[in-house]
Image (cartoon, rainbow, N blue to C red):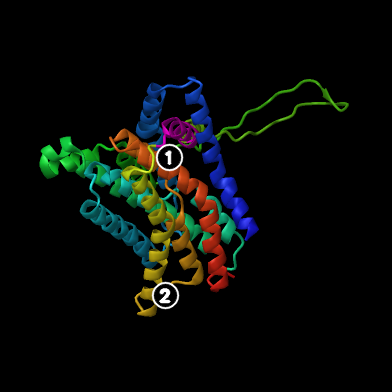
Amino acid sequence: MLEHMLVSLNTTMPFVILAALGIFLKYRGIISDNFVTQGNKIIFYFAIPTTIFNHIHRANLSAVFDAEFLIFNSAWTVVFFLGTWLLAVKLMKDKESVPSFVNSAYRSSLSVVAPPLLVLMFYGAADSDILPKGILTVSILLIFSYATAATLFAVHDPNARKKGVLGILMAIAKNPVVIGVVIGLVFNVLGWTLTSDNVYAVLCDYGHYVYGYDGYRMYTTVQTATFASNSVTALANLVMPLAMICVGANLSFHGFDAKFKYVIISVVVKLFVMPIAAVAVALFFNAVGITDFSGSDLTIIMIMNALPMAVGAYVMQAELGGDTYIGASALMLTMTLSAFTLTLFIFLFRVLGFLV
């Protein structure tokens, strides 16, 4: 149990520390509100789409393809999103905060927190397919996570609503993250990569003595052009540090008002309601014979839903006119608390026999 908590802390605490750095930099006047605004734009329009593209175009969509498992996880993400959205519209008095609340309550940190946890749980497992299945699930859920969020903010965009359904669809289509998803899928399906596999030999002619022997030495070097891939990866790596510094600079406490209540509810939904409900539905489907998920499958379902809020969710929220107070506060709380909640869930899964 201590090992799982340590891995969770190692994964999530850098987010908290970078956010604390953002608080300090803003307090000392080193960064300003304009820096935060411009930083969010860089992340949203360039870094996040690049991250999504990287994950999707590299994924082996044919390996360990379990249609039943992928359909369940994808459908659950959409259903939970729609249910949370419907309840928020009906119950929340502050309608302008609805998209920010929903976005904070269901978006999981799939690209950053999930992979190391999956490696910890399943590397070297008896079932050799379970780890690649988990990584593949991450790639697929990223598509649904960003597509649903793009829809959420497009529907709540006053300018898009004025143009009707066509305006909403256009707002979704122009979303940089959606564009990143589409390009990533095109590269994946067509088998394209960002590296060149051109191999050439370089002859190096040396006319000097080496350890007392006179002669020529021939070197054959395989060169692969990786500058495009390295550039894209470097841009994608901006997301976490720059976004968390912006989060810290945006953090504030309004007191125990309605918005703070929305933050707390979104945190409870993200860390407790979503994973418990997902596992309960999966167990019910097993019981009635619809599915046949193993204990490892159930563990992946739990992890995918118990993750903290995604950094990209906050950035999208900030850039598309959402409430940055709700987003930044929910992100910080879920990142801090998830180290303990995830450890608790993993311990319970071991006690229940889902994990060996």
The answer to whether 240 appears left or right of 125 in the picture is left
| Residue 238 on the magenta segment | yes
**SS class, disc 1:** helix
Residue extending furthest toward the right: 212
Residue 332: give x, y in percent of width and height. Answer: 46, 42
For residue 145, side relative to residue 220 (left or right): left
How far separated are the C-alphas under marks 1 and 2?
Answer: 33 Å
- The magenta region covers 237-253
Name the residue carrying label 1: 51
Name the quarter where the N terminus is drawn.
bottom right
Please tell me which residue is depicted at 56% across the width and 40% down the height of the picture: 14
Looking at numbered disc 1 in the image, what kind of residue is underneath it?
A: Thr
Asked whether residue 127 is in view, the answer is no
Q: Do the residues bearing badges 1 and 2 touch, measured as CB atoms within 8 Å? A: no
Q: Earlier in the sequence, mark 1 or mark 2?
A: 1
In the image, what residue occupies the spot 50% across and 71% down? 295
Above or below for 208 versus 124: above
Quadrant showing the C terminus:
bottom right
90 or 9: nearer the eye?
90
Residue lying at the far bottom of the rendered structure: 288
Residue at 52% across / 57% down in the picture?
342
Q: Is residue 139 above or below residue 210?
A: below
Position of residue 268 relative to residue 66, above or below, is above
Dominant SS of magenta comes to helix
Residue 42: which quarter of the image?
top left
Q: Which residue, given by chain and number where applicable, does mark 2 sit on?
A: 292
Q: Quadrant of residue 176?
A: top left
Q: Amino acid at mark 2?
A: Asp
Q: Residues within 10 Å of mark 2 (few under 14, many from 20)?
A: some
Q: Verify whether residue 51 appears in magenta.
A: no
SS at mark 2?
Answer: loop
